[in-house]
Amino acid sequence: MTAPGIRIEGLRKRYGEGDTAVDALKGVDMVVAPGEVVGLIGPSGSGKSTLLKCLGAVIEPTAGRMILGNETIYDDGWKIPDLRALRRDRIGFVFQAPYLIPFLDVTDNVALLPMLAGRPNGQARQRAVELLGALDVAHRARAQPVELSGGEQQRVSIARALANRPPVILADEPTAPLDSERALAVMRILNQMAVQYHTAIIVVTHDEKIIPTFKRLYHIRDGKTYEEAGQGLVL
Ligand SMILES: Nc1ncnc2c1ncn2[C@@H]1O[C@H](COP(=O)(O)OP(=O)(O)O)[C@@H](O)[C@H]1O
Ligand SMILES: [Mg+2]
């Protein structure tokens, strides 16, 4: 076994304090290997967004551990000094909407993160072009986001999430607005990219269309996760 992409142990998150405190996560365990795409499903209010925000170092957990690759990033407190660099370089985010920057062309939308991480512009652009090729949108490299179809924009946003070669990608409802065929196409791409770039991918979803695609799922209910085998539909 290779080192896990991401491992979470006994993660807790309490919002507020005293009488009004809400225990949103009550000891969550999860492990996602490089190359694996797991689903995270659960009813509204079960703690999905809270878990994703903790994993993305957007909010601070209350207790527990998070290990990214071989490094403990949280152990009853943050263990790394620069959370901004962590989010920028080691975690990829994919959302329901692509959120491309409208005044940058497709290449620069993808190259921006490596540039912010300190890579020379030429190298950052070269990586962007390579990823756009992997995602079948190389022919749109010089286009403005507004000129792309919705599906193309989504693929560019996946290229952007991969741009700094993060060990983990967090995808929040990435297929919600898409029809069945496009939703499955996005899942096929995420599975291919996970393998090609050794990325651990966590997909929060309500989307019945894509649930059969997961080999493994975590249900979250009342702040606790329960693992189950999925169908692993071949895409
Ligand atoms: N900023 C917050 N302050 C207080 N309670 C919150 C906050 N965010 C979420 N919660 C509560 O935490 C629980 C889990 O919410 P959330 O993680 O948003 O669930 P989900 O994404 O599964 O719908 C809910 O009871 C919600 O009301
Ligand atoms: Mg939510």
Image (spheres, helix red, strand yellow):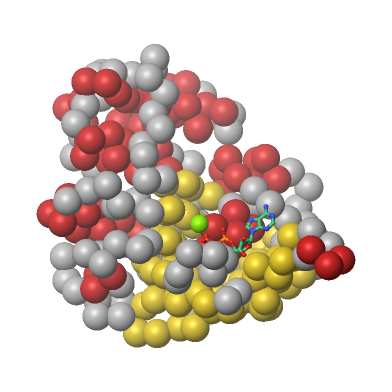
Please identify the residue farthest to the front as the structure is shown: 19
Residue at 71%, 70% (x, y): give it.
23
Name the residue nearer the viewer: 170 or 7. 170
Q: Is residue 172 visible?
A: yes
Residue at 29%, 62% (x, y): give it.
207
Q: Is residue 42 left or right of residue 156?
A: right
In the displayed structure, 15 sits above or below 123; it is below
Residue at 60%, 59% (x, y): give it.
50
Residue at 19%, 58% (x, y): give it.
184
Q: Is residue 132 visible?
A: no
Quadrant of the rendered image containing residue 162: top left
In this figure, what is the number of numbered marks?
Answer: 0
- Percent position of residue 32, x then y: 48, 71
Name the residue nearer the viewer: 211 or 216. 211
Name the residue nearer the viewer: 226 or 103. 226
In the displayed structure, 182 sits above or below 159; it is below
In the displayed structure, 9 sits above or below 186; it is below
Q: Is residue 227 left or right of residue 24?
A: left
Name the residue nearer the viewer: 33 or 216. 216
Please identify the residue farthest to the top as the structure is shown: 103
Q: Is residue 10 left or right of residue 195?
A: right
Quadrant of the rendered image containing residue 130: top left
Quadrant of the rendered image containing residue 98: top left
Check the picture and name the quadrant holding the C terminus. bottom left
Please identify the residue farthest to the left as the structure is shown: 181
- Percent position of residue 199, x then y: 42, 59
- Percent position of residue 163, x then y: 43, 39
Q: Is residue 30 left or right of residue 35?
A: right
- Percent position of residue 7, x then y: 58, 71
